[in-house]
Amino acid sequence: MDYLIHIRKTGTAAEFATKVGVARSTFFEYMDYMRNELNIVILYDRSAKTYYYSNKGLYDSLKQWIA
């Protein structure tokens, strides 16, 4: 998921779920976890049809947990 978000090639929620091999509902559970538990800001660009990080990516956000 991180790679697709990072390169901005996710597609819609349904397409993204298919790309990572999970149900659409599971995809939204993962997104909620990343946003709410890991405090990662993930936005959706409707014109480009992709999710993207607003500033830091997954690994940058996880550094706070490791340090």
Image (spheres, grey):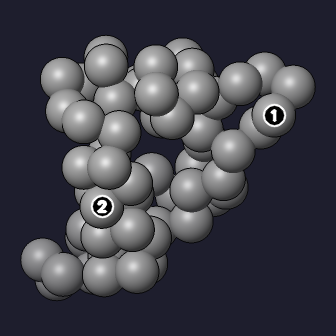
Residue denoted by label 2: 29
In this image, 10 relative to 49: left or right?
left
Q: Depth check: 55 or 33 in front?
A: 33
Q: Quadrant of residue 36?
A: bottom left
| Residue 1 horizontal/vertical position (percent) | 31, 35
Q: Is residue 13 left or right of 3 when viewed as pictured?
A: right
Whether the residues at callouts 1 and 2 have beta carbons within 8 Å, the answer is no
Badge 1 local density, few (<14 within 10 Å), some, or many (20+)?
Answer: few
- Residue beneath the point at 87% across and 25% down: 47
Residue 63 seen in render: yes
The residue type indicated by label 1 comes to Arg
Residue 65 picture location, percent across and down:
18, 81
Crowd tier of the residue under label 2, counting other residues whose Cα lies within 10 Å: few below 14, some 14–19, many 20 or above: few
Q: CA distance from mark 1 to mark 2?
A: 20 Å
* Image x and y of residue 61, in percent: 37, 68
Horizontal side of 32 relative to 10 (left or right) equals left
Q: Residue 11, relative to residue 62: is it above or below?
A: above
Q: Which sits earlier in the primary sequence, circle 1 or circle 2?
A: 2
Q: Amino acid at mark 2?
A: Glu
Task: Determine the residue positioned at 39% across, 68% down.
Answer: 32
**Residue corresponding to mark 1:** 46
Secondary structure under the numbered disc 2 in the rendered image? helix
Q: Is residue 40 above or below residue 20?
A: below
Give the residue displayed 38% in from the left and 54% down from the top. Answer: 28
Q: Quadrant of the C terminus?
A: bottom left
- Residue at 30 percent across and 81 percent down: it is 37
Judge left or right: residue 29 versus residue 40: left
**Residue situated in front as seen by the camera: 19 or 54:** 19
**Quarter location, residue 38:** bottom left
Q: How many marks?
A: 2
Say what secondary structure mark 1 lies in. loop
The image shows residue 17, relative to residue 42, as above or below, that is above
